[in-house]
Amino acid sequence: MAVLNRLMSRCRASSLIGSYSNSVRRYCLNTIEGDGKLPLVSPSAASSVPHPGPIVKPNSTGGRSVQWVFLGCPGVGKGTYAARLSSLLGVPHISTGDLVRHELSSHGPLSSKLGEIVNQGKLISDETIIDLLSKRLEAGEAKGESGFILDGFPRTIRQAEILEGVTNIDLVINLKLREEALLAKCLGRRICSECGGNYNVACIDIEGENGSPRMYMPPLLPPPNCESKLITRSDDTEEVVKERLRIYNEMSRPVEEFYRSRGKLLEFDLPGGIPESWPKLLRALNLDDLEDKKSLAA
């Protein structure tokens, strides 16, 4: 209850998120304090019209006013592509994974409990994630941020319903990648202990199936000054990664249908590494012209 009240008061004060209606207040109270059951989307309510592509409007600070969400299995590259779009559009990239890791490193009252959950590959409670996210949005609003790209939230129908009540998501980008490639990517992830840079030592080369093209994803190696400082995340073990993928398949895939039924879901199959996938993603988002203009102005 305390978490919800704090979230609601922040949302009322924030022009970024907007205000709750009485019906949303009742819904959130029932969801967080009740039995957790959520209304199902009727198949007849699902939109059969494909998403027409996002409309990206400039904001007063020269950035672009978007409120987007990235979905996808752990390790698919949500953070990488969200960060690139954040730079291109001039809006903040908010990763709930980063928010959790920041809380872990703060050694605050939550850090010990969060550490146990993360190391077991389990999902952190909705209340905790919403509290961390609301604090981040409040801080961004105070700095004059307009728009955001969310990465790692929502992961459950319950979270999606609550998010729907506090902000109007424009577009949900669902990144897809074959599971064997996902596992290799997660196990190959490395972080520079000094600068925090993210790298990947895995070289993925997978034969195509049923006429599909071969998938090749080269490693993303660090510069020489980071080579000796690479560390592996404590939760990037084969056992934990497989558990995270199992949980995602069980709990988070319904979120895809939640947004698909509202005509907000853009499915994107990653064809390979960043050099191959990035320009195709920009075309799918109608943003290839924007990057061309930025390149010419640079």
Image (cartoon, rainbow, N blue to C red):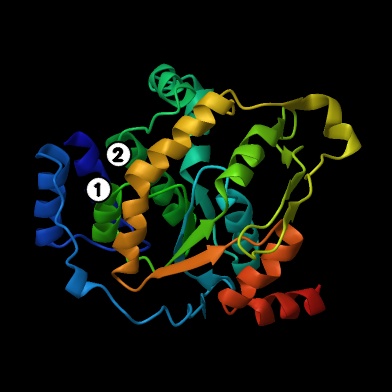
Q: Is residue 271 above or below residue 248?
A: below
Image quadrant for the N terminus? top left
Q: For the point 20% across and 69% down, which residue is it?
A: 43
Q: Which residue is mark 2?
A: 126
Q: For the point 48% across and 77% down, which residue is it?
A: 54
Image quadrant for the C terminus? bottom right
Q: Circle 1 — which element?
A: helix
Q: For the point 21% across and 42% down, which residue is it?
A: 4
**Can residue 1 be seen here?**
yes
In this rendering, position of residue 120 left or right of residue 197: left
Image location of residue 79, percent across then percent down: 58, 49
Res 277 → quadrant: bottom right
Q: Which label's residue is closer to the chain start, 1 or 2?
A: 2
Q: Which mark is residue 186?
A: none
State if disc 2 and disc 1 touch (CB < 8 Å).
Answer: yes
Say which amino acid is labelled 2. Asp
Q: Is residue 54 above or below residue 109?
A: below
Image location of residue 246, percent across then percent down: 42, 37
Q: Is residue 117 above or below residue 138?
A: above
Image location of residue 250, percent across then percent down: 34, 42
Q: Residues within 10 Å of mark 2 (few under 14, many from 20)?
A: some
Say which amino acid is labelled 1. Arg
Q: Which mark is residue 158?
A: 1
Q: Which callout, 1 or 2, points to the residue nearer the camera?
A: 1
In this rendering, position of residue 54 left or right of residue 180: left
Q: CA distance from mark 1 to mark 2?
A: 8 Å
Q: Circle 2 — which element?
A: helix
